[in-house]
Amino acid sequence: MRYYQGLIKRKFKDVVGSKYESIQKEYSDYILTEEEMRPREIKTILLPLDFSVTEVSESICELLSAYENATVTLIFITDAQISEIIMASLDKEAGEEFIQKKEDYGTRLLDDYEHCLNSRSIPCMRRMFLGNKQQDILKIAPDFDLVVLPKCYASNHPDSCAVSGDAILLAQSLTQPTIVF
């Protein structure tokens, strides 16, 4: 904080008394304190995946290797709403088949990501569940220091893999640092 006080004193050295104090107070609203400038230590990272994430991103594995002593939690979410629609419109067996196919795909994707991360000595954990892709991430994200979102996450068009509007909305809703790759 002394650095900023010195900076303000040099900038406004000709301003005296209460005017200087009011200027210092106004600047303090915009200038970070030294404590706020220290980078936050990242120990837990959340990496949510779904069926729209089609392949392992080597670049994200490389980026995550920069966070020493961090544990990555891989989560694959199968959309419960879609399975309910299938069960309601077709039958229960078709809904269960949908869930099974998505879980098989999720298992392969989690295996691939786990292999990519472990090859860079990044410890990881994994979970798979049926739920709401956005709401569930918002519920569990506060338990993590960093959230890494694939740009295709929750996209309806995984083939194009442009930045998903749902991923952008989710990133804006999160309160902790978020990387969209």
Image (spheres, grey):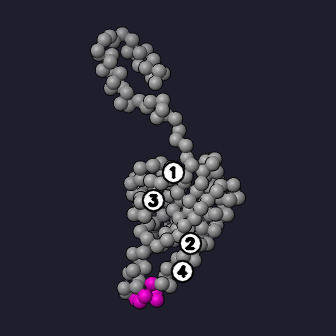
85 relative position to 46: left or right: left
Q: Position of residue 144 (x, y in %)?
A: 50, 53
Query: Which residue occupies 48% across, 63% down?
Result: 153
Side of 17 relative to 87 (left or right): left
Mark 1 packing: few (<14 Cα in 10 Å), some, or many (20+)?
many
Kind of residue at badge 1: Leu
The circle on residue 101 is 4
Q: Is residue 128 magenta?
A: no
Numbered badge on residue 106: 2
Expressed as whole percent of the image width and height from the top left, the position of residue 135 reads 39, 63
Residue under the image location 65 percent in, 55 percent down: 122
Q: Over which residues does the magenta segment extend?
A: 90-95
Q: Nearer the viewer, mark 4 or mark 3?
A: 3
Give the amino acid at mark 2.
Gly
Identify the residue under disc 3: 140
- Contact between marks 4 and 1 (CB within 8 A): the answer is no
Determine whether 51 is above or below 91 in the image. above
Residue 34 horizontal/vertical position (percent): 48, 29
Vertical comparison of 141 with 20: above or below:
below
Q: Determine crowd level at label 4: few under 14, some 14-19, many 20+ residues with C-alpha closer than 10 A.
A: few
For the residues labelled 4 and 1, the Cα–Cα distance comes to 30 Å
Q: What kind of residue is marked 4? A: Lys
Tell which circle, 4 or 1, labels the residue nearer the N-terminal end. Answer: 4
